[in-house]
Image (cartoon, rainbow, N blue to C red):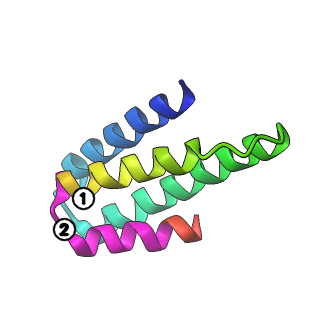
Amino acid sequence: MENILSIGAGVALRVVLDVATGKDHKLIGILIGLWEGVVLSHFLSKHTRSRSRSKDPYLALATRMAIDIYLSHSLSRFALTCAWTLVG
């Protein structure tokens, strides 16, 4: 259930940032990447404490990234998002 909420929040964030920034791919890629990194880190630390080896956080990240590339049609934004996810 948490992963579904994180997917919904990630898609909502993408839409809000698209509208708020006027489709500035560099800024959106950085902000979304940081968001994704923080969310992934949170879910991984949560699953590490419970000693569960679930792949759900990675599947949710892959789903959000697939939605991002589908909605934006921009490989540069996708690359920025991936790079900043590693930083976040």
Q: For mark 2, what is the residue?
A: 74
Q: Nearer the viewer, residue 30 or 52?
A: 52
Mark 2–mark 1 distance (CA, rounded to whole Å): 7 Å
Residue 81 in the image: state x and y as whole percent: 39, 66
Q: Residue at x 31, y 53 (%)?
A: 66
Vertical position of residue 59 compared to residue 21: above or below? above
Q: Which of 82 and 19 is in front in this view?
A: 82
Residue 83 in the image: state x and y as whole percent: 46, 74
Q: Is mark 1 on a helix, strand or loop?
A: helix
Residue numbers of the magenta segment: 71-84
Q: Which of 70 and 54 is in front in this view?
A: 54
Q: Is residue 27 left or right of residue 9?
A: left
How many marks can you see? Answer: 2
Cβ–Cβ below 8 Å for labels 2 and 1? Answer: yes
Q: Give the amino acid at mark 1.
A: Ile
Q: Which residue is drawn at 49% across and 53% down?
A: 35
Q: Nearer the viewer, residue 33 or 17?
A: 33
Q: Magenta span: helix, strand or loop, mainly?
A: helix
